[in-house]
Image (spheres, rainbow, N blue to C red):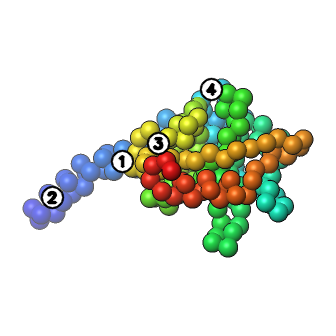
Amino acid sequence: MRIAIVLASILLLMVPVIGIACGGDDTTTEGSGNDTTTGGLLSPEWVNAQVAGDTVSIATSEVTSGRQLHFKISTDEGDRTYMAYQLNGETYVRANVCPPCRSIGFSREGDELICDNCGTVFNALTGDGMSGACRNYPKARVDTQTDGDSMTMSLLGLLNAYEDTQEAGWP
């Protein structure tokens, strides 16, 4: 009986700790998806990328919408995922992978990218890790060009950025 009371007491003491460790804070507010000025959390939205030869494109209107976008391309080695967003009037495309925790999802809050799995924070302007367990795996950037209604990227540039993000530190 005494052991049961001790175990119950330990369990009651651990419940608040577990809630805090698992992100039990309900104060996070979701952004509208279109507001990049208030710093609200922008959850990712998947869009389709078009691959034609060695060029990958997504609609310019999708990129300029103010949303945090994710897209993937299929390769012989499997799908490769990427994120696209605008910040301070500039477009960014980065590898969308967090190798140690195996996440393929990042939300953005202001100028920070936040891993949806482990919570590691990266600088959205530079791709550098700022805090968290996976911060040593910076998010490599891909060069983009706007061509009318499409934002285009080199397939090789995307694949290189993905591979660069798989290794700790910058190449």
Q: CA distance from mark 4 to mark 3?
A: 22 Å
Q: Is residue 66 left or right of residue 118?
A: right
* Amino acid type shown at disc 2: Ile
- What residue lies at 78% left-to-right and 55% top-to-bottom? 56
Which dot, 4 or 2, sits closer to the camera? 4
Q: Which residue is mark 4?
A: 38
Task: Report the number of numbered marks.
Answer: 4
**For the residue carrying disc 3, how many other residues have a C-alpha within 10 Å: few (<14), some (14-19), or many (20+)?**
many
Label 1 secondary element: helix
Q: Is residue 98 left or right of residue 132?
A: right
* Mark 1 in CB contact with mark 2 (< 8 angstroms): no
Q: CA distance from mark 1 to mark 2?
A: 25 Å
- What residue lies at 65% left-to-right and 59% top-to-bottom? 159
Tag 3 or tag 2, which sits nearer the N-term?
A: 2
State whether residue 131 appears in this view: yes
Q: CA distance from mark 2 to mark 3?
A: 45 Å
Which dot, 2 or 3, sits closer to the camera? 3
Label 3 secondary element: strand
Q: Nearer the viewer, residue 7 or 51?
A: 51
Label 4 secondary element: loop
Q: Which residue is mark 1?
A: 21
State whether residue 35 appears in this view: no
Tag 2 or tag 1, which sits nearer the N-term?
A: 2
Q: Which residue is mark 2?
A: 5
- Residue 135 is situated, as x and y percent measured from the top left of the image, at 43, 46
Image quadrant holding the N terminus, namely bottom left
Tag 2 or tag 4, which sits nearer the N-term?
A: 2
Q: CA distance from mark 4 to mark 1?
A: 27 Å
- Residue 87 is situated, as x and y percent measured from the top left of the image, at 66, 32
* Amino acid type shown at disc 1: Ala
Q: CA distance from mark 4 to mark 2?
A: 49 Å
Q: Which mark is residue 129?
A: 3
